[in-house]
Image: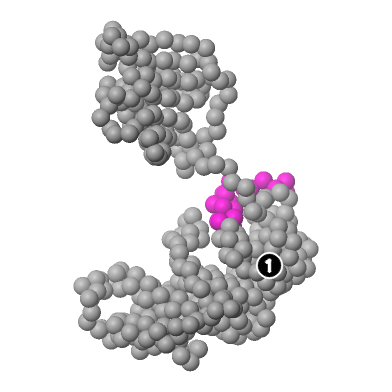
Amino acid sequence: MEISEQIAQFKIKINESVIAETFVKISLGNYRGSEEALKQVLVRKVLIKREDKLAFTFRYKTRDIVKNFSFEDGIQMISDYLVNGFKIATLFTTQGDFIFEELNNKKIVLREVAASTKTLPTLSNDKIKERLIKPDSKPYLTALKITDNEGKVFKNAQDKFRQINHYIEILSSLIKELPEGTIKKVADMGSGKGYLTFALYDYLHSVLKLDTEVIGVEYRSDMVDLCNSVANKSSFDKLNFVQGTIEDFNAKDVNLLIALHACDTATDDAIFKGIKANAELIVVAPCCHKQIRKEIEKNKVKNDVSFLTKYGIFLERQAEMVTDGIRALILEYFGYKTKVFEFISDAHTPKNVLVVGIRNKEQGAKNKEEILQKIKASKAYFGIQYHHLERLLEL
């Protein structure tokens, strides 16, 4: 039997095992091809966004590379490798192991042996994470329609639950950079329905065992009433929601100030409140950078990026970067170590930038004059008369 016929038989076995749900994995070995340092390929079935895929782990001498393919493309790739490189392939199933082998005399054999395993592997594409916020039977998760009464996450709330945990993971890593016991009072500006505010309170009290006061600030009174009702039913005694704006909120004694999606200059209002309160940690996810965009559009300064900013979409992105870049510089001026990174706040919304300021009590800002010059030069380059945060702080 020719090699093409043997490969066809091997592919049939793969398809049959997938259909019968007995497929465990495939191993390709004894590589004799031209790809440098490639030693082995392992193939397993994974579930990605509710779609079955084949995950290929390419094992090289010094590294592993993982790539995912559709079943059709993956099986074709296995076929090509058997023609051009690998001399042996084993299909592991719960019913038996099927071995394709090219012997030294070029003879091709296809044989079946007893199954190495009777257990099907998990289809998860990721290692199971230890969630900081567990569903369990938490009243606030049930009241917010994340879980049922038994603590099972609703199917249509899976993305929201992952978002909550992703958010807590980020804050957890930032809080760990602060001295123990630092976070005594938290203000969440623009808390909305409170998903993230409740989760943070739960994490601070249930996981870190802190006696932290948490305040959610929200303009919509119906949201405030709803969240206070849920907090009361959850026995979250040190969690309170108040009606008002960021601008009017008294941030005295706040150690951690958060503002996610505060529109345009409301983000500046939040940073201003945090700086004035000497908050140890300021975390904002800005949106709607209108103030600086209007400044750039109004003055139309010619510079090296004018060929980009003549297009509206590029101008919008440029305004976002300039706005948040100056915000980061201002935080540095007031003695904060800054971080700016991508934050995926929701599976159904665009990616956001998270701007973080961690107060450096001992060192502060040693190069204040240099920072001021950078702010001044940036404004001149883009034709910006003023930045709202700069004006609030009277720089």
Inspect the magenta stretch and tell me whether residue 291 lies in it: no
Residue at the farthest top position: 1
Q: Position of residue 146 (x, y in %)?
A: 63, 53
Q: In the rendered view of the protein, which quadrant contains the N terminus? A: top left
Residue closer to the observer: 140 or 341: 341
Q: Position of residue 159 (x, y in %)?
A: 54, 52
Residue at the farthest bottom position: 394
Q: Position of residue 239 (x, y in %)?
A: 72, 69
- Image height of 316 relative to 347, above or below: below
Q: Quick check: 8 left or right of 270?
A: left
**Count of all numbered marks drawn on residues in the image:** 1
* Magenta residues, start to end: 148-166
Element class at badge 1? loop
Q: Is residue 261 visible?
A: no
Residue lying at 42% horizontally and 29% vertically, measured from the top left? 42
> Residue 99 appears in which quarter of the rendering?
top left
Q: Main secondary structure of the magenta part?
A: helix
> Residue 112 appears in which quarter of the rendering?
top left
> Residue 244 appears in which quarter of the rendering?
bottom right
- Image height of 274 relative to 67, above or below: below
Residue lying at 25% horizontally and 30% vertically, measured from the top left? 34
The amino acid type of the residue labelled 1 equals: Glu
Inspect the magenta stretch and tell me whether residue 153 lies in it: yes
Q: Quick check: 85 left or right of 89?
A: left
Residue closer to the observer: 21 or 333: 333
How crowded pointer 1 is (Cα within 10 Å; few <14, some 14-19, many 20+) is rated as: few
Q: Is residue 156 visible?
A: yes
Q: Which residue is mark 1?
A: 180
Q: Position of residue 289 (x, y in %)?
A: 41, 76
Residue lying at 73% horizontally and 50% vertically, measured from the top left? 137
